[in-house]
Image (tube, rainbow, N blue to C red):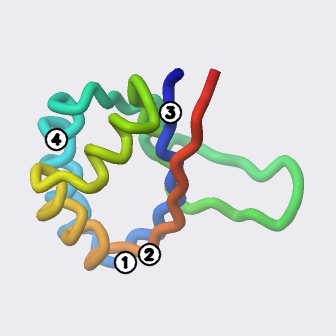
Amino acid sequence: MPAYIIANVNITDPETYQEYMKLVPPTLDKFGGKPVVRGGHAENLEGEWQPSRVSVLEFESFDHAMQWWNSEDYADAKAMRQRSSNTQMIVVEGT
């Protein structure tokens, strides 16, 4: 069953965040992850949520998503993202 990491990112340091974006793709490849959504136009349809930059990553399974999230491969990029943005993020199984 596939899994998706869904993030809402409020970028606070655009220059550093651009560097982060360059580091991520090779880390995803190793764990079978692929971007489905990367910051396109978003519009609120219901509720109070006002997303900044929405990203959705697809993985083969929940385990693959968690392996990527906890990997040494992603650790430096993750720290860079955390320094350059405020993020809300979840992982969810799909169908």
Q: Nearer the viewer, mark 1 or mark 2?
A: 2
Query: Image quarter for residue 78?
Result: bottom left
Taking the spot 45% from the left edge, 29% from the top edge, the residue there is: 36
Q: Nearer the viewer, mark 1 or mark 4?
A: 4
Q: Nearer the viewer, residue 67 or 46?
A: 67
Q: Tell me the SS state at disc 1.
A: loop
5, above or below 81, in the image: above
Q: Nearer the viewer, mark 2 or mark 3?
A: 3
Residue underneath mark 2: 86
Residue 3: percent from the left, percent from the top? 50, 33
Q: Is residue 31 left or right of residue 64?
A: left
Q: Nearer the viewer, mark 1 or mark 3?
A: 3
Mark 2 surroundings: few (<14), some (14-19) or many (≥20) residues within 10 A: few
Residues at marks 1 and 2 touching, judged by CB atoms closer than 8 Å: yes
Q: Most extreme residue toward the right, as rendered?
A: 46
Q: Nearer the viewer, mark 4 or mark 3?
A: 3
